[in-house]
Image: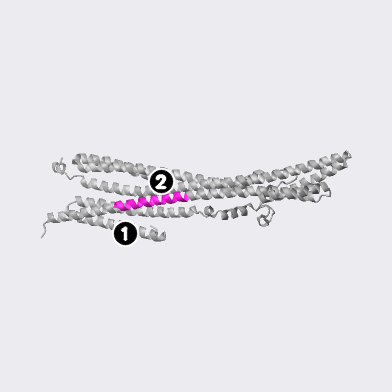
């Protein structure tokens, strides 16, 4: 055992200073990373909210649009049915030798038919080849129509979900970096105690601080990579 | 002639003054970094408010456009039926048609304006051009439709970018504080070397921060 080494009160102070410098560089780097991920988190949160607002607008528009288009189709359907019923009834009256009834109902059928024709020109479900029925007996392709008018809303919801996921990811990273900074603050405390202690105790505290710094460094690496 | 102890004391005073100056600069840089983040957050808040207002206006315009489209459809469909009635050879039906045109049609027409009565609101395929009507309604409510949330978001991105760069300078200044502290504790020989190192790091950090401020000041068109 070397008594002169043990009696040197400055022993280990350089090591403590170097560890302090290393810890400071780590803290500075992680602080910068924490600011960066916080900014990313804020931007993703903003995008998420902005897309959510746009989704509500898109749904309001498609709701009004589908209501109008289906009502127009419904109007055409009702007028067409009324025209057919009136025409059929007119034939019945003709068979019953009721000429006046026949003419009145035939004329009524014409009125409904004219109304149905006008409704048809205004209906996207009856005029657009993508949705129009293939025959008089068939129905329009309503599912394709809904799929098309909701396409924008679905795309916006996807963007909103992506932005929301990004927000949570960055926010979790930000929180984790704060935890790492707290760990490194503990290392600062241990190094401070080491600097003020007796040489033997100083080395022990330096070892503890090194362990804490290592934990903080590995943790920061894990956050950075994953 | 000064003795080494006197030199050391004078140097210690200078280091103390420098340390105070660097501490002040660190505090200022940290405040500015935080203020930039806060300004960016305020801009996002303002942009979001504008986005809500703009979307609420657009929602109302869509609702109105399709409500008018419904009135226009009812008017046009009824009008077609009425034309058939008017072409009837039956005097009673003709009289009924005349009454309908006089008393019912004007009310329906007034509700159907503009989509049902203005030919410019028809597509080439004969459908009602609701999109055009919506665009016109948006022009009429330009106080809401002209709001531009993206402009606020772009500004906030600008402040966030400056914040990122300024953090680097702030860290450099903070690191210089460590070197100044170290020089105060050191012996005379390495003391000056560590002090010079601290001053260099501080200078780089300060120039960095000032440079970032000046560049972004001009990028924002003279706004701090």
Mark pair 1, 2: CA separation: 32 Å
Q: Is residue B174 above or below residue A208?
A: below
Describe the element under mark 1 as helix, strand or loop.
helix
Residue under label 2, please give it.
A225
Q: Any magenta on residue A195?
A: no
Camera-side residue of B123 and A25: B123
| Secondary structure type for disc 2 | helix
Q: Residues within 10 Å of mark 2 (few under 14, many from 20)?
A: few
Q: Is residue A12 above or below residue B133?
A: above
Q: In percent of the image, x 80 and y 44: which residue is there?
A: A108
Determine the residue located farthest toward the top in the rendered image.
A96
Residue B200, percent from left and from top: 27, 58
Looking at the magenta stretch, what is its main secondary structure? helix
The image's mark for residue A37 is none
- Please give the residue where the numbered disc 1 appears in the rendered image: B207
- Residue at the spot 31% in from the left edge and 56% down from the top edge: B205
């Amino acid at each position: 055992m070397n008594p002169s080494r043990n009696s040197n009160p400055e022993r280990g102070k350089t090591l403590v200073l170097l560890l302090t410098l290393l810890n400071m560089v780590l803290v500075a780097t992680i602080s910068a990373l924490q600011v960066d991920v916080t900014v990313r988190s804020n931007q993703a949160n903003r995008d998420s909210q902005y897309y959510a607002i746009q989704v509500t607008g898109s749904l309001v528009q498609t709701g009004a649009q589908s209501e109008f288009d289906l009502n127009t189709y419904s109007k055409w359907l009702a007028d067409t049915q009324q025209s057919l019923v009136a025409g059929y009834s007119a034939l019945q009256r003709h068979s019953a030798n009721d000429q006046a009834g026949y003419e009145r109902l035939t004329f009524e059928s014409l009125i409904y038919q004219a109304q149905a024709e006008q409704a048809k020109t205004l209906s996207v479900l009856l005029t657009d080849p993508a949705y129009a029925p293939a025959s008089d007996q068939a129905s329009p392709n309503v599912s394709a129509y809904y799929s098309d008018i909701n396409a924008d809303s679905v795309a916006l919801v996807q963007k909103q979900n992506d932005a929301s996921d990004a927000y949570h990811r960055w926010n979790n990273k930000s929180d984790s970096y704060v935890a790492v900074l707290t760990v490194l603050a503990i290392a600062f405390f241990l190094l401070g105690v080491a600097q003020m202690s007796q040489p033997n105790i100083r080395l022990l505290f330096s070892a503890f601080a090194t362990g804490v710094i290592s934990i903080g460094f590995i943790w920061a690496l894990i956050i950075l990579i994953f | 002639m000064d003795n080494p102890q006197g030199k050391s004391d004078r140097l210690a005073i200078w280091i103390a003054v420098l340390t105070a100056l660097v501490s002040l600069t660190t505090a200022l840089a940290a405040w500015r970094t935080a203020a930039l983040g806060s300004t960016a957050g305020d801009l996002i808040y303002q942009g979001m408010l504008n986005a809500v207002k703009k979307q609420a206006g657009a929602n109302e315009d869509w609702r109105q456009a399709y409500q008018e489209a419904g009135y226009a459809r009812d008017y046009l469909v009824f009008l077609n039926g009425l034309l058939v009635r008017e072409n009837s050879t039956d005097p009673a039906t003709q009289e009924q048609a005349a009454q309908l045109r006089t008393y019912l049609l004007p009310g329906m027409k007034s509700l159907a304006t503009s989509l049902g009565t203005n030919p410019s609101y028809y597509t080439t395929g004969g459908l009602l051009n609701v999109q055009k009507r919506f665009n016109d309604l948006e022009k009429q409510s330009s106080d809401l439709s002209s709001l531009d949330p993206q402009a606020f978001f772009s500004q906030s991105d600008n402040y966030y970018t400056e914040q990122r760069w300024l953090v680097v300078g702030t860290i450099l200044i903070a690191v210089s504080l460590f070197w100044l502290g170290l020089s105060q504790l050191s012996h005379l020989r390495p003391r000056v070397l560590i002090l010079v190192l601290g001053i260099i790091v501080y200078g780089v950090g300060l120039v960095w921060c000032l440079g970032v401020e000046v560049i972004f000041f001009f990028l924002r068109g003279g706004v701090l």
